[in-house]
Image (cartoon, rainbow, N blue to C red):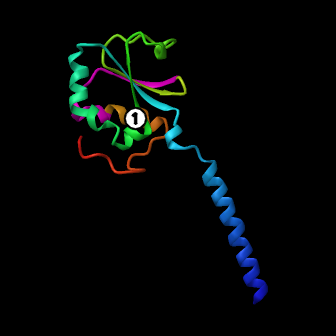
Amino acid sequence: MAAYAFVLASAVLMFGGLVAGALTSLPSRAASPIRLVMVEEPGCRFCQKWHAEIGRGYRNTDEGRFAPLQRVRRGAPELTGLAPVIYTPTFILMRSGEELGRVTGYPGADYFYEELRPLLSAAGYFPGFGAKEASTR
């Protein structure tokens, strides 16, 4: 019986070490290379509307934690090599400098997340995985 307990304890320690090692090797969400780049222009009324309706609470949503917002103006160096931005706002989902997709324009609070979620999903976002979405939507 003592040998069985020793083998069991050894397996638990070994398995626990493997799990702990695997967990520490996972990439940190804080270091995520995924960003939602918002291209805007001064005086853009649809940009202002987005900020008023979505912008204040975006960072507190699961989507905002998965793809933090980076605001840039049209012509910013971050956009070099991408297709031109014609309309503002344009939201470009980026991973390590590569465009994964975009939402052109602001369709309103009722449709913004519906247009954004398929892009996020293709980048590995799973709705509801993580903290609860902010109630400011």
Query: Which image quarter is the N terminus in?
Result: bottom right
Q: Does the segment drawn in magenta span residue 118?
A: no
Furthest residue to the bottom?
1
- The part of the image, by quadrant, that contains residue 72 is top left
The image position of residue 85, as x and y in percent, is 38, 12
In front of the other: 57 or 4: 57
Residue beneath the point at 66% across and 65% down: 16
In front of the other: 128 or 29: 29
Q: Is residue 13 above or below residue 135?
A: below
Which span is picked out in magenta? Answer: 98-114
- Is residue 42 found left or right of 99 in the rendered image? left
- The part of the image, by quadrant, that contains residue 114 is top left
Q: Does the segment drawn in magenta span residue 105?
A: yes
The image position of residue 32, as x and y in percent, is 51, 37
Structural crowding at the residue carrying mark 1, measured as other residues with C-alpha within 10 Å and reported as few (<14), some (14–19) or many (≥20): few
**Amino acid found under the numbered disc labelled 1:** Pro
- Is residue 74 found left or right of 21 in the rendered image? left
Q: Is residue 13 above or below residue 32?
A: below
Residue beneath the point at 50% across and 42% down: 29
In front of the other: 18 or 100: 18
- Is residue 15 found left or right of 32 in the rendered image? right
Query: Which image quarter is the C terminus in?
Result: top left
Furthest residue to the right?
3
Residue beneath the point at 45% across and 30% down: 35
The image position of residue 66, as x and y in percent, is 44, 39
- Is residue 84 found left or right of 110 in the rendered image? right
Q: Is residue 60 above or below residue 38?
A: below
The image position of residue 22, as x and y in percent, is 64, 53
Location of mark 1 (residue): 118
Numbered disc total: 1
**SS assignment at label 1:** helix
